[in-house]
Image (cartoon, helix red, strand yellow):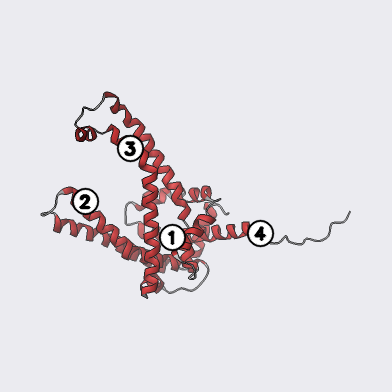
Amino acid sequence: MPTSAAVKASAKLALKDKWPTALGIGSIIFSVYCLNIVIAQIVSTLLQPIVNEIWLTVIAVLSMLLFCQFFFAPLLYGALRWFWFGSLDNDVSVNEIFYYFSSLKLYLRALSLSVRIFTRVIGVLFICFLPALIVGAVASPTTYEILGSEMPYWATYVWMLFNVLAMFGIIMSFIMLLRYFAAPILMINDAGISPQEALHLSVIISKNANGKTFSFVMSFFAWGLLSLLYIPMIFTLPYFICSYAIYCKNLIANYNNMVAPPPPTFTGYNTF
């Protein structure tokens, strides 16, 4: 497996003559991302007079999740498709980002993968944060108010354990979710496999490379902080996605070499 620096260098080389189109795709993704936020704010404004603050937050979050699942994710997979085939030196039209909207079958294929990834994220987060949630409930005054009893003095010290378990949950969930890192690329690269098979294959090829994948993702930490300013996201998104596509290409190649290593190169007979 190449280093993160080598993958980034390959991404820059792949984007060298394609930056105008890549920036256009980054602008489209960024605009749709902003549209999602605007829609959630409109929904919140319309419902504010008739629902309380808690339900208002729940409805706003649900509207954003539904938008991501039904529109943003298929668009993002289409953009990833452009970067994937572009990184293989293919001449790909910018219309490729709308590939998963071109037919109902393709749209359902992208939606299926998106929903499956989402359910796995929720399941992993629940399992990893369950100890922290239990400890948090023990240390919360609300729990004892519901039970109609006084909060014991020792419960105030349990919050320290809660913080430790919450940090543990963050780390473990991140590591476990790395198993599905290559699933979108596997689905994009092979139209013959189902979204479920793409997830299964991602777990298999990532089995011995989670450390490399973790290092690769963390190498973008500073770029991620820069993207929090939103506007730079137009420029950083193409770089992120292209690097991701090239990393997955090397991840797949590394697994193929492990399963079926290339034959040794003949260098001539040894003479003594």
Q: CA distance from mark 3 to mark 1?
A: 37 Å
Question: What residue is at 38 percent from the left and 34 percent from the top?
Answer: 164
Q: CA distance from mark 4 to mark 1?
A: 29 Å
**Mark sitting on residue 241:** 1
Say if residue 265 shows up in the picture: yes
Image x and y of residue 240, in percent: 43, 57
Q: Which residue is mark 3?
A: 134
Q: Please, what is the three-letter code of the amino acid marked with disc 2?
A: Thr
Q: Is residue 151 above or below residue 171?
A: above
Say what amino acid the circle numbered 1 marks.
Answer: Ile
Label 4: how many Cα within 10 Å (few below 14, some 14–19, many 20+): few
| Place of residue 43 in the rendered image (x, y in percent of width and height, measured from the top left) | 18, 59
Please report whichever mark, 3 or 1, sits nearer to the chain's N-terminal start: 3
- Please state the horizontal and vertical placement of residue 204, each as a whole percent of the image: 53, 56
Residue drawn 46% across and 55% down?
A: 180
Badge 2 crowding class, 10 Å Cα cut-off, few under 14, some 14 to 19, many 20 or more, is some
In terms of secondary structure, where does tag 4 sit? loop
Gap between marks 2 and 4 measured at Cα:
53 Å
Chain-order first, disc 1 or disc 2? 2
In terms of secondary structure, where does tag 1 sit?
A: helix
Mark 1 to mark 2: distance in Å?
31 Å
**Pointer 4: what residue?**
261
Q: Is residue 20 visible?
A: no
Mark nearer the N terminus (4 vs 1): 1
User: In this figure, which residue is indicated by the disc labeled 2?
Assistant: 57
Which amino acid type corresponds to the residue marked 4 in the rendered image?
A: Pro
Determine which quarter of the picture holds residue 138: top left
